[in-house]
Image: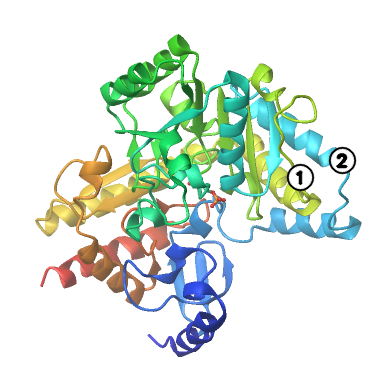
Amino acid sequence: MNTEKSRQLFKEAEKYIPGGVNSPVRAFKSVGGNPLFIKRALGSKLYDVDGNEFIDYVGSWGPHIFGHNPSFIKKALSDALENGTSFGAPTELEVKTAKLITELVPSVEMIRMVNSGTEATMSAVRVARGYTGKEKIIKFEGCYHGHADFFLIKAGSGALTLGVPTSPGVTKGNAADTLIADFNDIDSAKKLIHTNRKEIAAVIVEAIVGNMGVVKATNDFIRQLRGLCDEEKIVLIIDEVMTGFRVAKGGAQEVLGVKADLSTFGKIIGGGLPVGAFGGKKEIMEMVAPSGPVYQAGTLSGNPLAMSAGYAALCYIKDHPDLYNELEEKSAYFEKGIKENLKRLNENLTLNRVGSMLTLFFTNEEVKDFRSAVKADTKLYGQYFHEMLKRGVYLPPAQFEAFFISAAHSKEDLDKTIEANYESLQEISK
Ligand SMILES: *Cc1c(COP(=O)(O)O)cnc(C)c1O
């Protein structure tokens, strides 16, 4: 595979951009080698600057549930562009988008738009603190909630694969206000809540984790967590930045049958543009400025281009209730193919899947929390990644991430990928 142009661009990029990228996982650090520079994408395919074609399972890290550059989003964007790119004043589209989200996600009564998932989670915590008058938060080891200071403590995703569980630049004060519990272990959360009585403002959780690879909360765990938060008057924030509109129309909350007090969104909600949002109970959301005293703002929040793409995506989801059945069918077919390969090769790797999100962990043990996830052999994943890339399949360049299947993945794409999986696993076990 010729990747000369990508190599050149990366060399140039490293001179002007830290590590050559604008977000760390893109740099291929945990799988080795140089990142590919992408020129364009359509449907299930990515095309790099050297003219190589790949079946893509990253989907821009989650947003592209319909595949790349679908015509209905392109049309919405070009229509919006005619009217102007930003007004710094309210628009009708913001009202329609907010209303639609409250229809699709039952726990959300009011919502505020922001520009990224990080902004959404950061703001949700501020609101929870303002609402409860308490300061500490609990997060779970291996969950990733964006890069606000107080979340960069035992975080997942890039923070996990780069081995920087606590980043320099995060103050001791910030670290002290964030308590860490073990995912899927209700006793660890209970213990923290009881030793910090009346001090915990919020518990934040990815109810279906994507950022230590895919790991689903057990029904018991999430129900008991909900109960604990009710008893202790703690705001339960379910971070649906990845799972919202991905695992179901109503996100992880619909799959697990639980309701958050506040939910955070991003990725799919922006239809491929930079959007985030946080929302939930009216009583809590009315704390947000200007209706309440908790300050939160954004010059480009609710941007007309971003809203038009996001609104088009959400309307499509609302009008096509079969979308999630179709994704489930494709993803189950994919899972079955990979599992048959594993059997034929006498391999016993762990595959976790929830809907169209899945992770192939390079470990033989069940993965149900951070401790079991990090038993995966990341070196072997790196070799696997490059074997798949050689065969035209673009997987996440890190073990602790999710593969995403989109509506644009054809049976032919999936079959090719399953075959590449067989050959790649065979190659790396030599
Ligand atoms: C991606 C992600 C974020 C951060 O969103 P950004 O838009 O990258 O800031 C937060 N939480 C979860 C669960 C995510 O997957």
Indicate the position of residue 167 as horizontal and vertical percent values: 41, 55
Q: Quadrant of residue 286?
A: top right
Ranked by sequence position, the earlier of labels 1 and 2 is 2
Q: Is residue 83 above or below residue 296?
A: below
Q: Residue at x 52, y 27 (%)?
A: 135
Q: Sort mark 1 into few (<14), some (14-19) or many (20+) by Cα contacts within 10 Å.
A: many
Q: Are marks 1 and 2 in contact (CB under 8 Å)?
A: yes
Q: Residue at x 41, y 57 (%)?
A: 158
Indicate the position of residue 149 as horizontal and vertical percent values: 50, 47
Q: Residue at x 54, y 67 (%)?
A: 22
Q: What's under tag 1, amino acid-wise? A: Gly
Q: CA distance from mark 1 to mark 2?
A: 8 Å
Q: Quadrant of the C terminus?
A: bottom left
Q: Is the C-beta of the residue carrying label 1 under 8 Å from the nearest atom of ligand 1?
A: no
Indicate the position of residue 295 as horizontal and vertical percent values: 72, 34
The residue tagged 2 is 90
Q: Is the C-beta of the residue carrying label 2 under 8 Å from the nearest atom of ligand 1?
A: no
Q: What's under tag 2, amino acid-wise? A: Pro
Residue 145 in sight from this viewpoint: no
